[in-house]
DNA sequence: CTGAAAGCGCTTACAG
DNA sequence: CTGAAAGCGCTTACAG
């Protein structure tokens, strides 16, 4: 706004012949003001094109009306759709949304948390990927934080899906269709130490499913590429085949990975679902349009966004209440990629 | 931050035994301060966990350090990837990014522009879809605005691709491969009045290509679904086939549409590229992994983001300079969907 | 129902 | 190189 002569409440007050306080009352609408006064003030605001200075309001109120959303990679279809819903819900509730991306550099989550207080933010919705529990521990120095996704600690409000159970359900689904050697793209027991929470939780669920069915785990079937892009999904299949590993199904831990898997199998002349079954996770829009259409796990992303915002707003008004967890339901969507 | 006893510069000054001014000098780094003083101040800041209040700074400076990015639909793979790059570049240059979505409601672009001054924003990157020129006209009441995409007016800084030429090149490519009856998904001459600028510009380029080759336009081949989702692309093909229209190629104005087109053709037993050639626009990550892989138009989205930010920063420091246009190059990527 | 005063936490001239 | 004062534009008690 540099260089522009913005009108202030004082200007509006002068033009309308009232005090700045009255203008403030009209703008915020918290106090009753006589209708003819309101009208005069509004006319003056219109004439001067008055827009309240939110920095000043923020300084005074200690609130900016902005929340931040931090996601690992904004370019991922899943993240993009989630952001879309969060922006929509936030808009309905009067919040602006600031975005941050955390996957690019290792220290970005910590940096973000430490800067969060500075950045005019009333709250933060964070989908953690490498976040150490320790960082979340000193919450008293942070604005309200809601964690979303595969969250393992319990010190913060969080919105979850039961990924472990979903992943087990996928394993059951494949085993029921005859799969015995299920490759896993996105999970690798040997690398569990450095893996993301998402990877660990989904792998655990998968292993639950194997164990139930009495199938012995074969770590040669597990591969966890980074990052979880479509290209990486395709490369993972090439790698497995290169290793000479036989498999009759592939579980991919995101749809983006799964679409790469489908592509690589197709390129090698492996038929899906006749030779190999394939599943994804997330149900992004394109999954229904993959060839063949992809069996996957759908969660209600709108509900996800709503719950996150609700927790955040509740936390803003009750800083010391005990942390809460909300679980959003999921659903296995069966499509052609596992329809034998 | 409500409820938290945040340390202020005054507190830091008191603890370090200096004046607030000195603390400010240390924080901003604009003035030389004696090293031992710097050290004392930094120790005090660390002890008190001091973080500057950006509302106060913004009020004082008239700058917030935040820019806004407004895109029609954040869930679109193309928008998501563009946002990813903008956030990355903005971060490098010290800006936070606020996002807005404009497609949801008709008046959202106007609303956004009118609120822009209020929302603590130093500048706005806007990908307009229905924006009336009139709105951009009173730029003196807005923060710096850079328009991106298919922009037809010249009153504002803008980053463009030459979509019209790219679309003509696609038509040439198809015609060179024998196509004569090219269906268009995303452009419809009859509906040009209500279409988006993207649709109009790309359709114009397509018609250029037909005209060059002496091919007579057939409006029965044109269809412009809304919104431009994958589902809509599939539906458009069904609609064309339902109309009984024959075609030997399909030009889709985004990759998302094109992937829907591929799916619908496959479902109907139409082979690509043997029976029908298909092209997209944008080169999103998945296009290389479609079946068959998609011929499309690639533009450098990182360059797009960089140019937009550069124009915005230039405009912040020179409000009255004449508006500039930067054109980002594109490239036709030929893949299996047109490889006969 | 409306006014006059004070203050949110910074930074920018103005002095020293 | 550092201090004391003033002010950015709001809103919140405090009076009337």
Image (spheres, coloured by chain):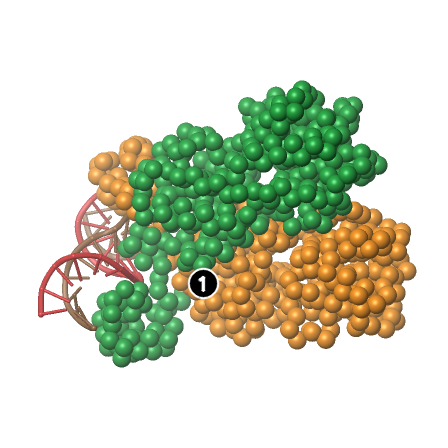
Chain colours: A green, B orange, C brown, D red
Residue at the spot x=77%, y=61% of the render? Answer: B237
**In x, y percent, where is residue B223?**
74, 67
Residue at the spot x=73%, y=55% of the render? Answer: B260
| In the displayed structure image, the side of residue A69 where residue A34 appears, left or right | left
| In the displayed structure image, the side of residue A46 where residue A305 appears, left or right | right
Parent chain of label 1:
B
Please tell me whether residue B130 is drawn above or below residue B63 in the rendered image: below
Pick the residue in front: B333 or A296: A296
Please tell me whether residue A298 is drawn above or below residue A50 in the rendered image: above
Asked if residue B124 can be seen in this view, the reply is yes
Label 1 SS: helix
Which image quadrant for residue B10? Answer: top left
**In x, y percent, where is residue A67?**
42, 50
Asked if residue B24 can be seen in this view, the reply is no
Residue at the spot x=36%, y=59% of the render? Answer: A54
Residue at the spot x=72%, y=50% of the render? Answer: A289
10 Å crowding of disc 1: few (<14), some (14-19), many (20+): many
According to the picture, the residue beneath numbered tag 1 turns out to be B116
Please tell me whether residue B282 is drawn above or below residue A113 in the rendered image: below
Quarter holding the C terminus of chain A?
top right
**In x, y percent, where is residue B303?**
63, 51
**In x, y percent, where is residue B39?**
32, 32
| In the displayed structure image, the side of residue B312 where residue B6 appears, left or right | left
Which image quadrant for residue A207? Answer: top right
Quarter holding the N terminus of chain A?
bottom left
Pick the residue in front: B123 or A237: A237
Pick the residue in front: A201 or B273: A201
């Amino acid at each position: 706004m540099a260089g522009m002569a913005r009108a202030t409440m004082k200007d509006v007050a002068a033009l309308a012949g009232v005090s700045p306080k009255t203008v403030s009352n009209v703008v915020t609408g918290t106090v009753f003001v006589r209708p003819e006064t309101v009208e005069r003030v509004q006319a003056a605001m219109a004439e001067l094109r008055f827009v309240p200075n939110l920095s000043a309001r923020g300084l005074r109120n200690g609130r900016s009306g902005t929340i931040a959303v931090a996601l690992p990679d904004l370019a991922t279809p899943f993240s993009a759709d989630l952001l879309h819903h969060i922006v929509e819900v936030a808009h309905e509730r009067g919040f602006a949304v600031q975005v941050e991306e955390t996957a690019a550099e290792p220290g970005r989550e910590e940096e973000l948390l430490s800067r969060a207080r500075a950045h005019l933010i009333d709250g933060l919705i964070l989908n953690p990927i490498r976040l150490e529990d320790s960082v979340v521990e000193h919450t008293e120095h942070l604005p309200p934080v809601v964690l979303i996704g595969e969250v393992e600690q319990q010190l913060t409000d969080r919105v979850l899906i039961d990924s472990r159970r979903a992943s087990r359900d996928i394993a059951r689904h494949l085993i029921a269709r005859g799969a015995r050697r299920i490759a896993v793209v996105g999970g690798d027991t040997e690398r569990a130490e450095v893996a993301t929470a998402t990877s660990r939780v989904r792998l655990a669920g998968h292993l639950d499913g194997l164990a139930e069915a009495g199938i012995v785990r074969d770590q040669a079937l597990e591969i966890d590429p980074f990052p979880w892009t479509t290209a990486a999904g395709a490369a993972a299949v090439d790698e497995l085949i290169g290793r000479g590993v036989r498999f009759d199904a592939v579980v991919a831990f995101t749809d983006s990975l799964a679409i790469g898997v489908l592509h690589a199998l197709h390129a090698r002349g492996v038929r899906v679902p006749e030779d190999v079954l394939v599943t994804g996770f997330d149900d992004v829009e394109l999954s229904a349009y993959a060839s063949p259409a992809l069996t996957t796990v759908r969660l209600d992303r709108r509900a996800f966004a709503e719950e996150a915002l609700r927790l955040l707003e509740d936390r803003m008004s009750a800083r010391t209440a005990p942390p809460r967890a909300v679980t959003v339901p999921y659903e296995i969507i069966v499509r052609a990629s596992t329809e034998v």
